[in-house]
Image (cartoon, rainbow, N blue to C red):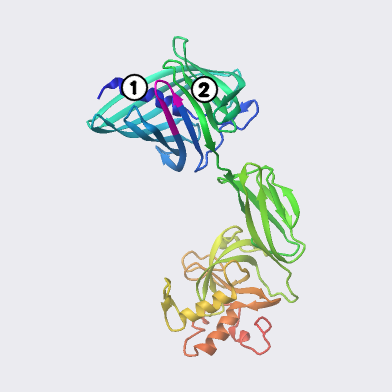
Amino acid sequence: MERGILVYVLIVTIAAAITLVLSDGGTKAELPTYNIGDEWVYRSTNDITYTFHYKVTAEETIDDEDSYVIETSYDPPFLGIKSGETTWVKKGTGDTMKEQWSGNYTGFLFTRTQTYSYQYSGADKWPIEVGKEYSVTRTQTYTITPPYQTGTETKTSTVKVEKMEDVTVPAGTFTCFKEVYYDEDGNVWFTLWHSDDVKRYVKTINNETGETTELVSYSIKEESLAISGPTGLEVGEEAMFTVTSRSSPVENAFVEVDGDTKKSGADGTVTLVFDQPGNFTVTTTKEGYEGASIPVTVTAHPEGAPHYEIVASVNWINDADTIEVGIYKLVAELDPGGEISEGTTERIRFGGGVDAPELTDYTPPRSGQPGSVEATEFIENLIPLRTTVYLDLNDLSVGGQTGRPYRGEYERLIAVIYTVIDGQWVNINAELLRWGLEEYPGFGWLKYRYYPSEWNPDDWLGENYPYVLD
């Protein structure tokens, strides 16, 4: 294979995919974020006219660096040998880290892989602003297989951001930063124009080859917001919600519920208070982002609430006597040795000595000991996923492996689980015990009543026990 063709391909590839310059508008250009689905179509004109189609298709970690994966297609195949290419772009800098493409040269199939490293001096590349000048040395190592060939090429450029100006290309007219690249002899070898709206260049000129590349069309996906916070609250209770994008807080996002709107702070948070019961949707929006929402159920509790220390939401029903919850509020002072905190997930084992038939196969159709499926369905109907529950922990329990308070032999929290159904406080442990003794009287529903417990399950069976369904 002739090396000259490969070098020419490399130059044009770099012209098309050289360090991505992204900006957020104004007199400085910061490095923003790409989204999967962003795409650009360019037309490159020299002796032959080519159309290049770039699309962000994935995010990957390469050499311990987070990167975007950009797939490129060429029409017609570049120099008749190159129809596509994969590029990895470092998220933190916008530098091209790696390129790989395969081709057919006079019937000879090959794959070329190029890796890059960069050294900057004089100034940081970011932010881009008019008047900035810096030098960059780009080292490229390429490998061609088969047969195995490898080599290294280095090019040093001085980059000057000359001005901002309007540039018209087939995709439209854009206000751009004009960057000029000089070689080591002071000659201009490359010029490009970057646009905030496009999130990369709209035009390039390779001053050495005369090739001009212009943007024909583009499609930019919006960033996505996420909002997190409690999904179950009491009337009058303050609740903090956090707005993020790609796990980073978003400031000045609008957070709206039931016609009232607030803006998120620098940490992405906003505090809301619900003054009436009901089912609500908390929505967040911000220009340039795809919005998000979270459902919230607010309850007004009836008189005569039982004692409880934790407010949580049901995440999963493991079986009839074990559930998983997300804790969003501690309403009593707990022994810190229990290692229980808000914002964590815990498995809860029904206290009071209650036991239920064991499930042995959790994959539908579920199976296990007689009554296990029916008992699990009974609990699922009483406290479906996302139900707010109130946990009264067993102060006499001690973790079998760690000695932590409130925990049982397998380190699950031992508790009585309460919820509110049709305006009535309900003890879920008591409901399970009553149901089980009636439906499956031959099973030992109080198998573990000999364990130390602050509750007497016989009380739950009494005619006047208040926390069971009428």
* First-in-chain label (1 vs 2): 1
Quarter occupied by residue 457: bottom right
**Which percent across, then down, holds residue 89?**
45, 34
**Which percent across, then down, holds residue 34?**
52, 39
- Please tell me how crowded label 2 is: few (under 14), some (14-19), or many (20+) other residues with Cα within 10 Å: many
Identified by mark 2, the residue type is Leu
Q: Is residue 367 left or right of residue 385?
A: left
Residue 50 magenta: yes
Q: Is residue 46 left or right of residue 229?
A: left
SS class, disc 2:
strand
Q: Mark 1 — residue?
A: 7
For the point 77% across and 62% down, which residue is it?
Answer: 275
Q: Nearer the viewer, residue 470 or 357?
A: 470
**Which percent across, then down, holds residue 202?**
53, 28
For the point 50% across and 77% down, which residue is it?
Answer: 376
Whether residue 229 appears in this view of the structure is: no
Q: Mark 2 — residue?
A: 192
In the rendered image, the vertical position of residue 220 relative to residue 453, given as above or below: above
Magenta range: 44-52
Q: Are marks 1 and 2 in contact (CB under 8 Å)?
A: no
Identified by mark 1, the residue type is Val
